[in-house]
Image (spheres, rainbow, N blue to C red):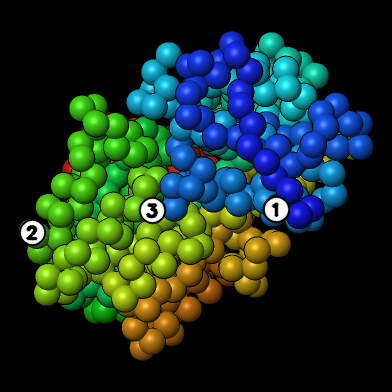
Amino acid sequence: MKFSSIKPFSIALSVSVLLAGCNGTNSQSGQGNDDNFQVGLILVGPRNDAGWSQAHYEGIEYVQQQMSGVTLEYADKVNPGDRPNVKGSQVADDLIAKGADLIIFNSDDLKDDALATAQKYPNIPVIHASGDSAWQEGQNYQALPNLANVMPKMEYGRMIAGCAAALSSETGRIGFLGPLINDETRRLVSAAYLGARYCWQTYRDRNPEDLNFRVTWIGFWFNIPGVTLEPTKVADDFYNSGYDVVMTGIDTPEAAVQAKKAADSGKNVKFLHYTLRSGCNLAPDVCVGVPTYNWGPSYLKLIQDAQAGNFQSQFIWADPDWQDINNPDTSAVGFVRGEAFSPENNRYLDQFIQGLGDGSINLYQGPLNYQDGTPFVAAGQTATLQQIWYMPQLLEGIEGPSR
């Protein structure tokens, strides 16, 4: 596949009027060629957002590098702020009408659209990147044979990032720029805190009570003027009030941009970007690192199955490759170290990653409490997958609201 052959397209009239300015690609000149397999990708944010949506787009580019004949049409910025009158299911209708053989929805915010599309088109494989509708042991199972959920085990990436943040902080004040509040974001913020607390106490030999870990939620995955908090201001508030390391869970790069500005003004601050391997490039001098989420291998397997007629409903919670967490062909979760991560801390982070991989470090062992003091995991117990996935509160020790 030569990406220079990708050409822009316009979405069909039924939706294109509402999606004015929406982007798309088509990697073949003719439609309906049986030798080609067309993927329809629906992105909640811009495909070049330097974060979440770009990582999914690059995941499909990876598939195209591995498979011949895979073409892509996509719609980005499918969200209530950019497209207030358009549903993701409408966009799927249009992509399927244009010949899409498989549809991907890339956000938890598009869960209802993924379900509606799978129900409406039983012969079209639908992948929801997030969600639990295909998890038979989950709380929201739907018996739809053409629907699959896929997520990396981001909790590991967040633990590693939290550890790196704690190793890099001089003040013990770590800020987390959070999106909206739901089970997913609560578990990821909690995982980051667990990693930070462990490494603060174990490798820094500091009192965990002296670790100040705070999350501020903006209200969505990225800024919607007049609806969310302004992420630039939230990041600045962290940097201006003594938080010397800021992590981000939003899809866009405000934590990085404002860290650079703060550092240029003389503040000793650092940041951790989110999901995209190239995230440190935004401000390399002050980047501790990036927990990366690699969609390529999971998308490749599902698309291969679909092309062969073997697509099955399944819930994929994809593991890191502990032999090489940054292997692009095998690992769903990785961590790229930045220039601001000191070389002397490498051995501690290596020990931490090795411990997570061999099971000698399990941060989900009790006793662990929720913020209100009620038990999350009792002493002597280990959290189940369901307990980890469905978190009604943040964990005790984290500042910031759970709801």
Are circles 3 and 2 on residues that touch, CB within 8 Å?
no
Q: Is residue 356 left or right of residue 366?
A: right
The disc label shown at residue 241, or none: 2
Nearest to the eye among marks 3 and 2: give it. Answer: 2
Count of all numbered marks drawn on residues in the image = 3
Would residue 197 be seen by someone viewing this image from the given angle? no
How much space separates mark 3 and mark 1, taking CA atoms? 40 Å
Q: Residue 191 carries which label?
A: 3
**From what the image shows, is residue 118 above or below residue 260?**
above
Residue name at image x 70 percent, y 37 percent? 26
**Image check: 321 left or right of 106?**
right
- Percent across and percent down for residue 302 are 75, 41
Q: Residue at (74%, 27%) from the top-left corner?
A: 100
Q: What whole-number distance in Å separates the C-alpha atoms at marks 3 and 2?
A: 24 Å
Question: Which disc is residue 4 wearing?
Answer: 1
Number of the front mark, 3 or 1: 1
- Amino acid type, residue under disc 2 in the picture: Ser
On the image, the x and y values in percent for residue 236 come to: 15, 54
Residue nearest the observer in this picture, 333 or 2: 2
Q: Depth-wise, is mark 1 or mark 2 nearer the camera?
A: 1
Residue depicted at x 74% and y 42%: 27
